[in-house]
Amino acid sequence: MLPICPNMIGGILLYSDALTEDADNIYPSTDRLPVAYASNDVNATANVARGSLNLTESKALDNGYRFVWEFTPSQGNGTIAAVALTSAKGGKNAYGSGEASNTAFLQLMETRLESQSEDELAELYSVVEVDFEHGLMYSLTYQDQSVILKKKRLPVFTIGLNERLDDTTATLLEEEVIYCNTFHFLGSYTPYGDFLDGHDGYWYGFSNQANSSGNAMVYWIKIKKSDYSMMEGVWTLSNVQMKTVGSFKVDTYVQRSIRGVIRNGYLYIEAYNDEGIYKINLNNVADVTLIPLGFTSMNRPLGSSTGTCTNYLAMVNDLIIAYDYMVKPDDTVAQTAGNYKFNYIATPLFQYKEFVFFWGGNYGSDYRLAYLVTPYLASINNLSTAVVKNTDKTMKITYELTEEGEVSE
């Protein structure tokens, strides 16, 4: 990653709309993905959204760095209203393209969990929310007709004299047993069910079995975060054929599978035939939409390890990502190259600014991992007048960074 140029700052993102000029605007809404981009090398792929770095003209200066990017007539076409520097990896394919979809994430950390008991690992695998600012994590499991909620201390920005960063000192702060009359996990050998953060003041639990025909039946529970009060029930979704939302079991190894994600009050879950994704209103079961993918997905998980943990859908910022497609906030589907993006992922992605964290493992090898989301905004420049790049034009962008002040020795 060093030197900073041309690595941590080594790419460029071009947007069709102006960006909010705010230092905290690290990731703009993915309603509109970059129309074009480039990295710190020559584009040798067929990706026409990507340009190339001019390796001769780009160079370190006495007090900064000069980037020169070039786009051929077939590359980077569209309206350009804003320009932003990004990382070298972020400029290769942004969040994903037809050439690759794994360059959006860069692994930074992998902590082996070697001294936890089976119960402690199960609590980590069942985490549904991490509060980074307050150093807290919440796990939800189903057992004996009840939902077991555990709130634990997780050292993040502050660490006690006797605490460690390998999850061995995750102190239990609170435990709540929520008895259920209706909600339960289905299945016998494999218990089908999962819990997700609604990002709306509630946690949600869902249990269903995959169905290839007829109606889908989903048992659900909604738990209020502030007082742990709950509502539960059963949905009968007419003419909906969907995969199971998830599963969780402990049998020699801790195992979790996730196929659903919640965004803006809707549950997104894969269609059984891999040709679409369902969008289900959490507060109005009659509001169900099947979003066609426009192709048949390969239906593979996000992680390269597919033994005892699998996650098929995750959310980064406001973008839903799958193995070979993305769903933007306006529910537009963008097909991407099918790539594994992470290792060992068993939980949702827990994001803090530029970073995502999660737990996972495979047949007794258990980890906590951290990744950098690479298409971040390292600078924001809105053009006074938008320009239109089309197939009868080439485009050349020169961007100079100047270092101000003295660098301490």
Image (tube, helix red, strand yellow):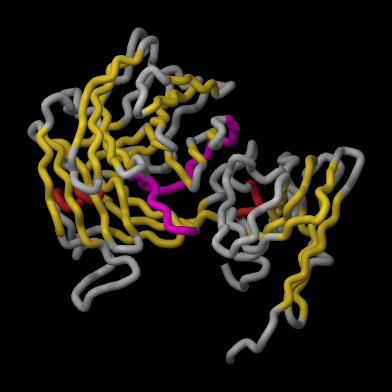
**Residue 231, horizontal then vertical, whole percent:** 21, 31
**Residue 75, horizontal then vertical, whole percent:** 79, 43
- Along the horizontal axis of the image, is 330 left or right of 63? left
**406 over 133 or under it: above or below:** below
- Along the horizontal axis of the image, is 174 left or right of 24? left
Q: Quadrant of the C terminus?
A: bottom right
Q: Foreground residue, 135 or 274?
A: 135
Q: Which residues are magenta?
A: 332-353
* Residue at position x 78%, y 65% in the image: 399
* Residue at position x 74%, y 81% in the image: 63
Q: Quadrant of the N terminus?
A: bottom right
Q: Foreground residue, 288 or 167?
A: 288
**Residue 26, horizontal then vertical, whole percent:** 56, 58
Q: Does residue 340 belong to the magenta stretch?
A: yes
- Along the horizontal axis of the image, is 287 left or right of 96? left
Q: Please count the marks in the image.
A: 0
Regarding residue 87, the answer to whether it shows in the image is no
Regarding residue 229, the answer to whether it shows in the image is yes
